[in-house]
Structure formats: C-alpha cells, structure tokens
C-alpha cells in the first residue's frame, strides 16, 4: 500500500501534462541559442515581445540580488551583463512561482532570500559569475512548488507531518512521499534543459558533498539555504535550520568567520530584495479560502 | 504585518487582517488571537495562509530577535559538535550586532 502511494506520487509529479507551462518565448529563445550565429539582439527581441515577462525580468535583475541595482534598462542589456543562463533561470522562476504566488508567498520569499545569500556566498568565495550562483539559489526549491501543484493532497500531508512530528520539510517529504524535492528538482532541470551547473545545485543542495560535477554550485546553494533560514526570511515550509555541511564550507574554501560578511550583506539588502514580488499587483487582501 | 502559511501559525499570534470567505464575508475578525483550536479549525476550512501582526523583514533584520530565535532554529541539531560550534558563532555574531545597534540608538 505504501509502495503504491510512492509509485503513484512519482508518476503524478512526473506527468508532463500538468506541469506548469513555461512562456512560449522560452522555447523560441532556446532554439535561437542553439545556433551560434544568433545575435544577442535577436534573443532580446523575442523576450521583449512578452511585455509582462520582460517587466518581471527587469525587476528581478535590478534587485540587489544581482548587484546592479537600478542600472539595467533593457532585456538586451541584461543579457549582455548576466548571460542567457541567468535570464533563463529568472524566466523559469517567474513562470513557476506565478502559479503559486497566491498561497506560497513564504516559499517565494525563501527562494529570493536564498538567491541573495547564495550570490553573497559566491562573491565571498571569489567564484566566477556570481549571478549564476544566485540563480541556483533562486531555483533550489522549485520542486516544492511543483509538488504542491501536482500533489495537493500529499503536499498537505507533508505539511501535517512537519507540524505534528517537528520534522524539517525535506524529512517530511521523504517520510510521506518516499523522496524529496531534490529528486523532483533533478527531473525538472532535465525536463527544462537547465544548464548542468544549475541542475546540480538544485538536486544536491541538501548534500553538496555528493555533487559529482559542480560541487561549488551545490555548496553555495546549500550555504545560501542555511543563511536564509538563520534569518527566517520567508519559509521553506518549516522553521528550523538545515544541518550546515562542514564539507560545503571546505569546498568553497570558506571559514565560519568568513560567513559574517555574508550575514552583513544579507541583513543590509533584505529590505530592498523583499520588494521584489511576482504576486499580482492587486495582491489579494488577506483572504483565506473558506 | 506579515503573511504566513498556516503551518507556521502559532497560538498567541494576533490576526492583522480578518479571515474571509471567498465571497468576502469575514469569518474571523482582525485582532483575534490565534489558539491551537482555532488554527486547526482554520486548517479544516482550507485556509492556508493568514496575516498576523509583526513584520517579517524587520524581525529578520533585528539582531537581538535573531539571538532569541537561535535555540528554536537549532532545536533538532542535538549535540552535533559542528552545529554547536555554528550556533555559538551565530550567537556571538548577532549579540555583537545587537550591542552595536543599541549603542548607535543610544547616541542618536
């Protein structure tokens, strides 16, 4: 019986039919990118055609998460500065969180907080392209959003286990579903053809020491997740810190004391980052459904 | 005011906004203090988020608030030596920040 539940849960999550659809422009852009002769201008043109999406992307890339506050005025400029992988990650996150913005705001805040923290960790560790690490933080819990959409009943049961047994969300997922959002993440990353760096961060942020190819990305997202939990900004579904992996700090060549700067930067920028929201502007006033 | 998922609602928190039915009819008024019984009733009604008094960002940024939350956040880490060290380090970090804030406020 229990095995049956696990098998069917897996099937349901993995059913493409009901997966959140990504904006059409993303497909088109992905095709363009495969041709090395495509110009940035051409890619920017396609994205800019979707005005709502463009506005969201610009709002995000101009937030302190990426460290260019208020300076990026066009999609083309954002592509030059941040690269296609980052912009693609931003587009995917806006699309997936759009569906959930009504009742999972806490997870959105947790994710954007993690993006900020992961970027700060990457900068402190002097890693190349810190913006790509920010995207790893932004997308690290995407599997939780998708699980909530695809398996609302089981999602509720996971929440119940968190509440009654004092589990962390990840532990409760494994108890109820038999697998965690890290597995869902790996599959989603595969399905959406995310770059392997982001895929590994998404699938290994709970066990960065097991990352096979991109331990730096997994370790940075792992530490970012820990930092946002220490500050309790938003919610990953429970109110506990995750066990911080000592090995993750070693991978990043950081000491505990090095994290102080990350904490400083996080507290400093949180106010501004918290203004980045994908909830509809008319945001519903405190209505629970009854 | 902050919006939190019902899973994080605790007895003693105060509603900052009324809880309403989908048609807008209020069921529970703003200012009501949550109790365990009320929370499970809300859960039964399918309410999954509530607005409670308090400010998430301010609470996150306030170092003395962080110091008081550490034991709670680390409650399941047991006596893991590395996590104990991490917790001590955080306590020290936030305590110093809180003292610096207090000194700055005293002067200003």
Image (tube, rainbow, N blue to C red):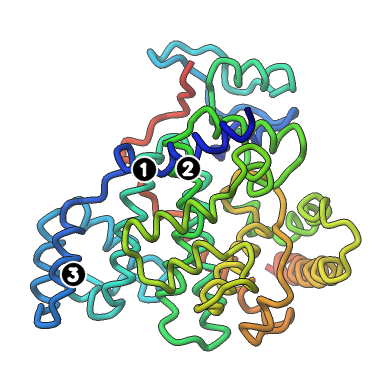
What SS does tag 3 mark?
A: loop
Left of B37 or right of it: where is A286?
left
The residue that mark 3 highlights is A74
Chain to which the residue tagged by mark 3 belongs: A
Residue pictured at 60% horizontal, 33% vertical: B52
What SS does tag 2 mark?
A: helix
Residue pictured at 10% horizontal, 78% vertical: A38
Between disc 3 and disc 2, whose residue precedes? 3
Residues at discs 3 and 2 in contact (Cβ within 8 Å): no
Check the picture and name the quadrant holding the N terminus of chain A: top right
Between disc 2 and disc 1, whose residue precedes? 2
The residue that mark 2 highlights is A105
x, y (%) of residue B46? Answer: 53, 20
The residue that mark 1 highlights is A279
Chain to which the residue tagged by mark 1 belongs: A
x, y (%) of residue B90? Answer: 77, 68
């Amino acid at each position: 019986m229990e095995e049956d539940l696990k098998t069917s849960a897996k099937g349901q999550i993995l059913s493409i039919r009901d997966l959140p659809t990504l904006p059409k422009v993303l497909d088109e852009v992905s095709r363009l990118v495969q041709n090395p002769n495509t110009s940035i201008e051409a890619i920017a043109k396609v994205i800019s055609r979707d005005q709502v999406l463009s506005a969201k992307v610009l709002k995000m890339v101009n937030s302190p998460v990426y460290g260019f506050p208020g300076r990026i005025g066009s999609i083309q400029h954002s592509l030059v500065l941040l690269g296609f992988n980052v912009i693609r990650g931003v587009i995917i996150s806006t699309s997936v969180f759009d569906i959930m913005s009504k009742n999972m705001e806490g997870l959105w805040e947790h994710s954007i907080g993690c993006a900020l923290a992961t970027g700060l960790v990457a900068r402190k560790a002097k890693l190349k392209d810190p913006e790509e690490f920010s995207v790893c933080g932004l997308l690290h819990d995407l599997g939780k959003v998708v699980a909530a959409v695809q398996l609302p009943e089981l999602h509720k049961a996971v929440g119940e286990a968190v509440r009654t047994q004092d589990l962390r969300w990840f532990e409760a997922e494994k108890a109820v579903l038999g697998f965690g959002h890290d597995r869902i993440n790996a599959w989603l990353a595969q399905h959406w053809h995310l770059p392997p760096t982001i895929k590994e961060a998404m699938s290994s942020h709970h066990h960065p020491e097991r990352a096979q190819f991109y331990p730096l990305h997994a370790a940075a997202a792992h530490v970012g997740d820990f930092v946002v939990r220490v500050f309790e900004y938003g919610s990953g579904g429970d109110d506990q810190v995750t066990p911080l992996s000592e090995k993750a700090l070693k991978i990043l060549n950081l000491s505990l004391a090095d994290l102080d700067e990350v904490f400083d930067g996080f507290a400093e920028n949180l106010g501004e980052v918290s203004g980045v929201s994908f909830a509809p502007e008319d945001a519903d006033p405190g209505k629970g459904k009854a | 005011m902050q919006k939190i998922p019902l899973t994080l609602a605790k007895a003693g928190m105060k509603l900052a906004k009324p809880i309403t039915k989908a048609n807008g009819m209020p069921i529970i008024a703003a200012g009501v203090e949550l109790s365990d019984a009320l929370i499970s009733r809300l859960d039964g009604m399918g309410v999954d988020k509530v607005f409670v008094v308090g400010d998430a960002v301010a609470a996150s940024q306030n170092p003395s608030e962080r110091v008081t939350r550490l034991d709670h956040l680390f409650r399941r880490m047991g006596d893991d030596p590395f996590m104990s060290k991490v917790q001590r380090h955080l306590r020290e970090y936030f305590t110093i920040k809180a003292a610096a804030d207090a000194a700055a406020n005293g002067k200003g």
